Image (spheres, coloured by chain):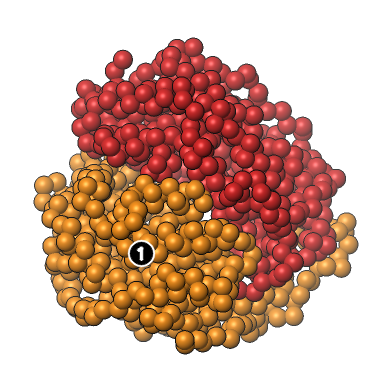
């Protein structure tokens, strides 16, 4: 059995912020009844050390890798089976296969039907889930430690022995088709789906939704699910992540018992796909008659998680639109009052990604909002960000780490994401330094490289009758109408 | 992650039932300072972070006629800057040190909370105290107009432009009489938001935002002695406000069936059933929670079997108790499958209601429901932010922050007879609200008598 115990990586943020060193509990001795100047912001005190989760690596007799983090605050255990294949490898024309497969895991096994599975987990108050993302599929369990054995038994059963029973499959298919129908209710969903299809085209996996389309959902057969399962749910294509009130010696026999004889298999190579070139910026309007707001979803194809620009993109995004106090929101919301919130993000996946800028804006300021969006996207390419903005963003990113490693499920989620993106266990031990090294020159160069307002897809879901004229008068690009019979359902 | 054995969460395992979670106690120190501010300290050094969570015991219940939505609009104004802290600085300073923050308003309380690395506690107390004591001098018409627009956009985004988004507002218009403060919604009407003035800000602040109407929880990795010094330093000189008297009309009781219909831009019809029930921590509340679980939680629930699996007429089905400070309701929300007539759903609902009114739930149903509720108590206190909010919630409603065990023990005492009894007592066939929301142009799908 191969076991590596990583040393706890002490994360000395203090070194990064030398400006606040030594200012420990500045006012501790002050007499509280003394008048003082309230306009002076209190000193920061000494930044605490963040000990990143110590990941213990071991494997079962069949080679299945396990990553375990001890977390003894509460008598809980979080377990996550990560399959390193997700919706990206859905068969052509069968979008939704990975997610449908994951959906069916708890609908029947060789020894339990759907009701027995649900009864067993509800009886011990456990939470069981399954699903798929672009790059991975997941089975998750949160349980009280005292019910670990019972919960693990059910968790392993649905992970390893699903039968995809026909009757349950048809019922789930119907419910999934109805959810697809319900997409029409939500302008945000309509815009996001139209954006994906326009940016990636229908032959790229990212062009169709993870949950599939009406057409693809109708075409998926029981053997499609069984094939997906038997191809990708293999011990050599999976990792178990355990975070909670347990130790390796406690978990090993339990995991060995349930997962130790799980078979390995040949995992097909993942294909590469081309992304269509966008020749010029164009608007695509999805009609929602009488809508009180327009939903703006602007952007284009962008970097994958492995890109050398990734770290720069994190800082760039934080300044531009990654949080409340970023430029786009301060402009659109806090200055203009056009929206309840505006954000940007880079969605960096394993095989590619996208950049997007988004907001729901009041219908009668749709055109004015577009002007502000384009202003911010162009400004960050043409002018340096201020030193203050840069420091704000970097500190914001680095010092948020202690908040993101707080609970077992957060930790398990981060480890899962590291796994799927081939990042090392100690990735976050150098993350802060990398973020700190980003300069204002880097931000501008990255903006020029990764944000291109002149080759952008601008999707707007709203009341076309009210907004079209205003958008045309901006002269920022051709205005097209999509949706209805032809575009994403 | 760095762990301390002397964690302040004590789990004394006792055998309430075969699967009880045990006893939960969240140790804390509570005191009041001279101006009446309640302070609750809870040390938990399992992560190097600290949370400040402040509750003002005021919400839309305290709004004047013609000013619906004001308590929530006022919450927005607290992020716009106070005398000694510059405009917009609240978000900038906290996010700028890696923190997370927000606020929220309900009918009965308004909370503000922020979590940061533990060394920023003093800054958080400085920020919170400044807006408790020195908000008005920094208030301007321009800020009010800006946030009025933002809140109107929130109403558009979260209510008007959201499928079924106006259903609950319309239900409560009918469940509560016009003079009852739960009659109107927390988001308020566009008209009333337009009418809100700087004078309203001033008088609401003076009436409800005094330290004597607030409770401050500090939780996480911090030194209690130091925190007490800072609390006194920053909050000590803020004067008390007047004594707060909340409206407290009698629990309204519907004396008829109110059936109505709305058309919306939706694909699926949805039906709502709403009964007057009980307020928060009423003796029947836990049994009503269990009733909701038995009816609609999980694949073995009554609704899943009857409406989703065996005879699929519904896409989703939920039943739950909704408790507020001075009143509450038992509610059902069921989305039909495409083109299903809501009368078909209604018929099945009444069959299930009659069934649970006449036959005891099984022992297995009871255990599943209660064990799931109990486990959710433990899942719910994993994050320091949520734990702090819970302490403030127990304090505000019961006067005692460590209410976890007392709350939990209510569920272990609920019997099958209790569930049957509350089903009979509250799910009255003649006195309730039934709302059908149907796709535009399809009124024929509504549940008609």
Q: Which residue is at 37% across, 22% downward?
A: B350
- Image side of residue A453 versus residue B380, left or right: left
Can you identify the residue that label 1 sits on? A159
Q: Which residue is at 72% across, 69% downward?
A: B5
Most foreground residue, A359 or A424? A424
For label 1, the SS is helix
Q: Which residue is at 32% across, 63% downward?
A: A161
- The reply to whether residue B97 is visible in this rendering is no
Q: Colour of chain A?
A: orange
- Image side of residue B224 versus residue B60, left or right: right
Number of callouts in the render?
A: 1
Image position, residue A102 (x, y; %):
30, 60
> Crowdedness of circle 1 by 10 Å Cα count: few (<14), some, many (20+)?
many
Q: Which residue is the extreme one toward the left?
A: A486
Most foreground residue, B109 or A265? A265
Image position, residue A41 (x, y; %):
70, 65
- The reply to whether residue B408 is visible in this rendering is yes
Q: Which residue is the extreme one toward the front?
A: A111
The image quarter in which residue A408 lies:
bottom right
- Chain under label 1? A
Image position, residue A31 (x, y; %):
88, 62
- Image side of residue A384 versus residue B420, left or right: left
* Above or below, comparing residue A214 to residue A195 in the picture: above
Image position, residue B36 (x, y; %):
80, 42
Most foreground residue, A266 or A268? A266
* Above or below, comparing residue A51 to residue B349 in the picture: below
Q: Colour of chain B?
A: red
Q: Which residue is at 19% across, 67% downward?
A: A227
């Amino acid at each position: 059995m191969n076991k590596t115990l990583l040393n706890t990586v002490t994360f000395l943020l203090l070194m990064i912020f030398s400006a606040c060193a030594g200012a420990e509990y500045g006012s501790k001795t002050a007499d509280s009844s003394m008048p003082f100047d309230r306009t002076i912001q209190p000193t920061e005190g000494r930044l605490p050390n963040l000990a990143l989760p110590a990941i213990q690596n071991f494997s079962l007799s069949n080679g299945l890798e396990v990553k375990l983090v001890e977390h003894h605050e509460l008598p809980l255990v979080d377990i996550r089976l990560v399959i390193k294949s997700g919706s990206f490898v859905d068969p052509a024309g069968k979008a939704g296969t990975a997610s449908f497969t994951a959906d069916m895991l708890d609908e029947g096994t060789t020894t339990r039907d759907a009701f027995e599975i649900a009864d067993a987990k509800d009886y011990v108050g456990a939470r069981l889930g399954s699903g798929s993302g672009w790059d991975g599929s997941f089975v998750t369990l949160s349980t009280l430690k005292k019910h670990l054995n019972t919960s693990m038994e059910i968790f392993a059963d649905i992970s390893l022995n699903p039968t995809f029973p026909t009757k349950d499959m048809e019922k789930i298919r119907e419910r999934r088709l109805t959810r697809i129908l319900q997409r029409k209710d939500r302008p945000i969903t309509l815009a996001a789906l139209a954006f994906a299809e326009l940016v990636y085209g229908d032959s790229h996996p990212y062009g169709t939704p993870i949950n599939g389309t009406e057409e693809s959902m109708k075409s998926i057969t029981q053997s499609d699910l069984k094939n997906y399962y038997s191809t990708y749910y293999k011990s050599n294509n999976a990792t178990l992540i355990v975070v909670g009130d347990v130790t390796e010696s406690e978990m090993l026999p339990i995991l060995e018992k349930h997962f130790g004889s799980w078979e390995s298999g040949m995992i097909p190579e993942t294909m590469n796909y081309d992304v269509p070139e966008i020749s010029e910026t164009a608007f695509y309007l999805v009609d929602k008659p009488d809508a009180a707001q327009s939903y703006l979803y602007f952007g284009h194809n962008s970097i994958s998680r492995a890109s050398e620009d990734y770290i720069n993109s994190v800082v760039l995004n934080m300044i531009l639109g990654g949080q409340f106090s970023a430029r786009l929101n301060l402009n659109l919301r806090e200055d203009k009052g056009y929206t309840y919130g505006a954000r940007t993000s880079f969605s960096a996946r394993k095989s590619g990604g996208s950049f997007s800028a988004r907001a729901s804006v009041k219908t009668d300021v749709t055109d004015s909002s577009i002007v502000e969006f384009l202003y911010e996207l162009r400004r960050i390419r043409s002018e340096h960000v201020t030193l203050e903005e840069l420091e704000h963003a970097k500190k914001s990113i680095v010092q948020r780490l202690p908040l993101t490693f707080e609970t077992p499920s957060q930790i398990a989620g981060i480890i899962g994401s590291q796994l799927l993106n081939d990042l090392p266990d100690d990735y976050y031990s150098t993350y802060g330094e990398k973020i700190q090294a980003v300069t204002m020159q880097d931000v501008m160069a990255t903006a020029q490289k990764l944000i291109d307002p002149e080759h952008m897809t601008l999707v707007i879901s709203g009341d076309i009758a009210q907004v079209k004229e205003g958008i045309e008068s901006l002269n920022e690009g051709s205005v097209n109408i999509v949706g209805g019979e032809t575009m994403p359902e | 992650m760095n762990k301390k054995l002397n964690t302040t969460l004590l789990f004394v395992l006792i055998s309430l039932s075969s699967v009880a979670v045990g006893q939960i106690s969240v140790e804390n120190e509570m005191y009041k300072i001279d101006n009446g501010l309640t302070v609750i300290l809870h040390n938990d050094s399992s992560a190097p972070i600290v949370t400040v969570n402040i509750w003002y015991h005021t919400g839309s219940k305290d709004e004047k006629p013609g000013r619906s939505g004001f308590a929530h609009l006022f919450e927005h104004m607290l992020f716009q800057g106070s005398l000694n802290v510059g405009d917009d600085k609240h978000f900038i300073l906290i996010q700028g040190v890696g923190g997370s923050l927000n606020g929220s308003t309900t009918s009965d309380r308004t909370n503000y909370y922020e979590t940061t690395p533990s060394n920023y506690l003093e800054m958080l107390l400085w920020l919170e105290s400044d807006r408790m004591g020195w908000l008005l001098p920094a208030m301007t018409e321009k800020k009010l107009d800006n946030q009025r627009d933002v809140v109107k956009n929130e109403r558009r985004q979260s209510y008007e432009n959201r499928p079924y988004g106006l259903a609950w507002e319309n239900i409560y218009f009918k469940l509560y009489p016009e003079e009852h403060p739960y009659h109107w919604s927390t988001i308020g009407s566009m008209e009333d938001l337009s009418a809100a003035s700087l004078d309203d800000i001033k008088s609401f602040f003076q009436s409800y935002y005094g330290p004597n109407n607030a409770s401050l929880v500090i939780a996480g990795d911090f030194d209690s002695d130091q925190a007490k010094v800072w609390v006194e330093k920053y909050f000590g000189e803020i004067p008390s406000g007047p004594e707060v008297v909340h409206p407290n009309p009698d629990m309204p009781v519907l004396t008829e069936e109110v059936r109505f219909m709305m058309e919306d831009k939706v694909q699926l019809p949805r039906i709502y059933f709403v009964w007057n029930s009980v307020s928060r921590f009423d003796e029947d509340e836990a049994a009503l929670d269990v009733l909701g679980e038995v009816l609609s939680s999980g694949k073995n629930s009554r609704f899943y079997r009857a409406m989703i699996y065996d005879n699929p007429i519904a896409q989703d089905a939920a039943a739950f108790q909704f408790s507020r400070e001075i009143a509450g309701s038992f509610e059902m929300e069921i989305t039909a499958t495409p083109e299903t007539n809501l009368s078909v759903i209604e018929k099945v609902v009444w069959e299930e209601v009659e069934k649970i009114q006449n036959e005891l739930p099984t022992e297995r149903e009871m255990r599943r429901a209660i064990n799931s509720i109990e486990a959710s108590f433990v899942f719910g206190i994993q994050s320091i932010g949520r734990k702090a909010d819970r302490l403030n919630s127990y304090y505000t409603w019961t006067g005692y922050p460590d209410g976890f065990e007392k709350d939990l023990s209510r569920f272990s005492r609920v019997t099958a007879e209790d569930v049957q009894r509350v089903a009979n007592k509250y799910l009255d066939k003649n006195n309730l609200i039934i709302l059908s929301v149907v796709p535009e142009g399809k009124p024929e799908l509504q549940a008609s008598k």
